[in-house]
Image (cartoon, coloured by chain):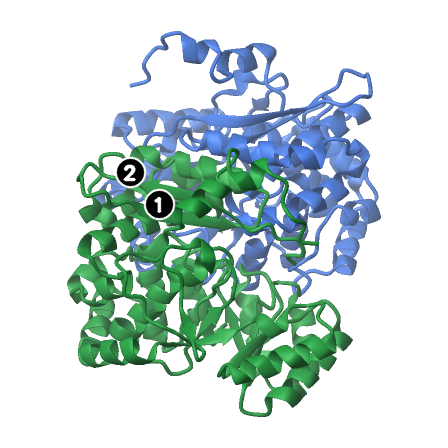
Chain colours: A green, B blue
Amino acid sequence: MNPDPDYSAAYVVIGTDAGDGLEGHGFAFTIGRGNDVQVAAIRALEPFVLGASVDAIGDVWHRLVHDSQLRWLGPEKGVMHMAISAVVNALWDLAAKRAGKPLWQLLAEMEPEALVDLVDFRYITDALTRDEALAILRRAQSGREERTARLLADGYPAYTTTPGWLGYSDAKLTRLCQEALTAGYEQIKLKVGADLEDDVRRLRIARAVCGPDIRIAVDANQRWDVGDAIAWMRALGPYDPYWIEEPTSPDDILGHAAIRRAVHPIRVATGEHVQNRVVFKQLMQAQAIDVVQIDAARVAGVNENLAILLLAAKFGLPVCPHAGGVGLCELVQHLAMFDYVAVSGSLEGRVIEYVDHLHEHFVDPVVVERARYLAPTAPGFSAQMTTEAIAAHRYPGGTVWTQPQPSHA
Amino acid sequence: MNPDPDYSAAYVVIGTDAGDGLEGHGFAFTIGRGNDVQVAAIRALEPFVLGASVDAIGDVWHRLVHDSQLRWLGPEKGVMHMAISAVVNALWDLAAKRAGKPLWQLLAEMEPEALVDLVDFRYITDALTRDEALAILRRAQSGREERTARLLADGYPAYTTTPGWLGYSDAKLTRLCQEALTAGYEQIKLKVGADLEDDVRRLRIARAVCGPDIRIAVDANQRWDVGDAIAWMRALGPYDPYWIEEPTSPDDILGHAAIRRAVHPIRVATGEHVQNRVVFKQLMQAQAIDVVQIDAARVAGVNENLAILLLAAKFGLPVCPHAGGVGLCELVQHLAMFDYVAVSGSLEGRVIEYVDHLHEHFVDPVVVERARYLAPTAPGFSAQMTTEAIAAHRYPGGTVWTQPQPSHA
């Protein structure tokens, strides 16, 4: 579905008059065309941020999401919502820098009442009330210090998509699976959906290399209609796929539910394109998914992801974030770690996607060792690109645009 | 929910090298802020349209909707989808002008095979296959001439929202209800959701003026959570509201289903903010709505609305289009009339919203007489604004922007 991505980002920097030199960085990740539309959308949000206090992110969030004119363009979805994500995440990056803490820790140390104040319960009260959210957070207060210590010592489990891209030879697939095992991964993921015969062969090879105990997830990137998804996954069933990710349209709640009923015990996962908390709510209400794949930069930033983490906790579902792209690993690790310390309190069935590229552009890049994300300790949301990377990629003056580049073909 | 709309449009004009002087006009309606984002989104689509043939709208549609990079910004929702709507509708305006027919007639005279070729069945085949769509259209071929003649003679039923805006005095509400009756309307609509006591009083007054046989719909513009909607509508129940429109988030399929079960026999209507055919499909599958409110300029233009009309026919639900705004009445009348002649074949329970403003800006404005839309006969999609209106409203040079305007306050 994404044959020719040209990884891009509409990048936001927010400064203040505090005189402390701190900036908040955030971005909307895109895969090329349309990045200028994201820039226009972020520019449309400037008036809502100018003059606001970094201590009132909840208020800014509400003004951005519920502006009576801008919401006509959604509501709460697509380009405008991704723009809000970039701005809100930049504000959180700044808030965490000011607090001198990594974002996961800043959030994990907040009181339950302060956290629920960040959540907009509009349209989700039939599934999760403020009181229920408070109860979830209060229950998780017990053991926070212990989990924080364990997280700092051991990190958070990762899985790798490295072996799984389409178009690799069987020999390369075999080698990459072996390397993943050697690196300590207990889960890998294969892209599927282009050709059934190929997929059967690839999954058979991967299972043979990995043995029965390694989880092999598969990812269809929305290729299928409901019937196709069911037929395809039944054909892959003998090789014990752990989850099927994005089997169909991310908007199709009932479709995911039908697929899940039909392919049991294969798990169903989705979320990287799920537009907001209202759709996540229904995916849970309809028992349509087993795995909640939050994305850091699609819903309206940290605040809305907090609502989704709380919904997942209410429904007892594991959150296994989507990552990759530009900086998505950097951001989403904070949300998963906060979830572990202060919301779900569990690592059971939880794992963050890890894609090993483009981290060199970030000031505080992710560190994955022995198949685990190490907990970031630098203040902020790990969202800031290096001065050199920003200068080189800035459109239209950056050297990436003005100088001939090596071909990727 | 929309307290201060500033009616706007990102306006598209498409010319060709045919030398016939014909242009296709289309637009994304907005309510102010964000209109520039819509313009940026439409600009991003230019490369897909340049050099394309007006005879291949289906191909252009597919390239626009399924572009692998642009779809990341949706997929198929929000700003990008509304931009596609503007472009696709402009192409249809041009195609109808070239054919010398109003769009409703151009579509109604097409063969079923040609119509289904315009539809993208991706993600809806679990509810409607191509063969089922063909069968629906073939069944409707019988009686097309008779219905066309009846439509040209009698027009298509309209309802009015004029009496129903919030903030009117009881005396004004009474007078406007009486005027609607005098004008021949058999349905009116009242906005609700700001204050329950007010709503009860307003609906009681409207019912007293209108008597038991006039349908009084109410419209909450997404104000409520599920529980609020149910409680509020139970309180309004004694005054026999005909439908409750947009009781909650347009994304909340399961929420609409829960509301519908609870407020029966009051009908549930939604659609003006429903993002695409995938969500409409589910609203029907879940038995969440009684009334399908298509909008001409939110989903991806005529082609996607054709898919939605076919889904509605499959599920036996009436389509009662949303209109108002800038030019939405002008556009959507064509879709409803085409539906009557060539898809559903029925006027039973069907009615187009009519809002009596801004029609003076259009070359071929709607004509509503005795509470019925008269069928347009001029070639095109009725989408073209007058040269004067375009010149006056064009940003930033138009007189509306450069000269002091009278206050609307």
Percent across and percent down for residue A394 are 48, 39
Q: Chain of mark 1?
A: A
Instruction: Identify the secondary structure beneath mark 2.
Output: helix
Residue A213, quarter of picture: bottom right
Amino acid marked by disc 1: Val
Residue at x-position 58% and y-position 92%? A212
Q: Residue at x 49, y 35 (%)?
A: B186
Left or right of A66, for residue B186? right
Query: Which SS class for mark 1?
Result: helix
Neighbor class of circle 2 (other Cα within 10 Å; few <14, some 14-19, many 20+) is some
* Position above or below: A174 against B213: below
Please tell me in which quadrant of the rendered image residue B128 appears.
bottom right
| Neighbourhood count class around disc 1 (C-alpha, 10 Å): few under 14, some 14–19, many 20 upward | many
| Residue position for label 1 | A87
Q: Is residue B26 above or below residue B313?
A: above
Residue placed most toward the observer, B284 or B368: B284
Instruction: Indicate the position of residue A246 as horizontal and vertical percent values.
Output: 57, 67
- Image quadrant occupied by the N terminus of chain A: bottom right
For this rendering, which residue is in front, A374 or A92?
A: A374
Q: Is residue B272 visible?
A: no
Q: Are marks 1 and 2 in contact (CB under 8 Å)?
A: yes
Cα–Cα gap, marks 1 and 2 = 8 Å
How far across and down, in percent of the image, does residue B7 sit?
Answer: 44, 26
Task: Pinpoint residue A121: horizontal percent, then vertical percent.
Answer: 29, 58
The amino acid marked with disc number 2 is Val
Seen in the image, is A341 located left or right of residue A295? left
Q: Chain of mark 2?
A: A
A305, B347: nearer the viewer: A305
Q: Which mark is residue B245?
A: none
Which residue is denoted by mark 2 in the rendering? A49
